[in-house]
Amino acid sequence: DTGVSQNPRHKITKRGQNVTFRCDPISEHNRLYWYRQTLGQGPEFLTYFQNEAQLEKSRLLSDRFSAERPKGSFSTLEIQRTEQGDSAMYLCASSPRVNYGYTFGSGTRLTVV
Amino acid sequence: QQPVQSPQAVILREGEDAVINCSSSKALYSVHWYRQKHGEAPVFLMILLKGGEQKGHEKISASFNEKKQQSSLYLTASQLSYSGTYFCGTANRGSNYKLTFGKGTLLTVNP
């Protein structure tokens, strides 16, 4: 068990560019979550996968955000046409079933300049 | 809807006790507690599922009052390593698979 891995750790991008983040969950975990966290705030829910199916996407999320989890393994989160307001820490978490604690990755810190 | 945590911040001396509260306006299915140290990922502490259930280790425990839609985290005889931001995450009936987190409580334990 190597934990939840996220890459890259840091990403600086110019406004308007597209970015993609990757999350490798714990291999036995079929549930995968993306959260966004800004300074002084708790993690904010973005989207949820059970195996390869995306079962919920936050209504706060614009159409510029998309996530995939092909074959129910790793997941990617893409942000198109980035804006300064997208600057945040993007956290991925996984769990093996409902009513079980999440294991979070170390996150990808995005800075849009 | 985001749960409300109180207090926002607390400063302790090593060995003192603290209570962190979490309340929701919606019926809760479960409550999770996490601790996050600066620059690190949140770390799972415990989950509570039943009304009035109390769980935890000897010095960190929690209770869940399902009727009042509240949970409390108890830290006794605090240690320096307890410092960090504590988040409660709540799962509502009907969407028990996802957590909504509070804004956090910053706990500082000084020598």
Image (cartoon, grey):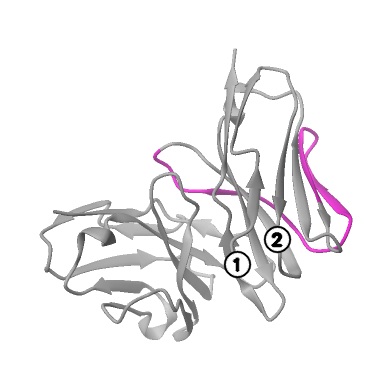
Query: Which disc is residue B1 wearing?
Result: 1
| Callouts 2 and 1 on one subunit | yes
| Image point (43%, 42%), residue name | B40
Left or right of B95: which side holds A50? left
Asked whether A24 or B30 is in front, the reply is B30
Inspect the magenta stretch and tell me whether residue B56 lies in it: yes
The magenta span reads B39-63
Quick one: label 2, few (<14), some, or many (20+) residues within 10 Å? some
Q: What residue does disc 2 label?
A: B24
Inspect the magenta stretch and tell me whether residue B37 lies in it: no
In the image, residue B13 sits, relative to residue A25, either above or below, namely above
Quick one: label 1, few (<14), some, or many (20+) residues within 10 Å? few
Q: Secondary structure at mark 1?
A: loop
Asked whether B41 or A14 is in front, the reply is A14
Q: Position of residue B46 (x, y in %)?
A: 70, 51
Left or right of A97: which side holds A32? left
Residue type pointed to by label 2 = Ser
**Residue B9 image-quadrant placement:** top right
Residue type pointed to by label 1 = Gln
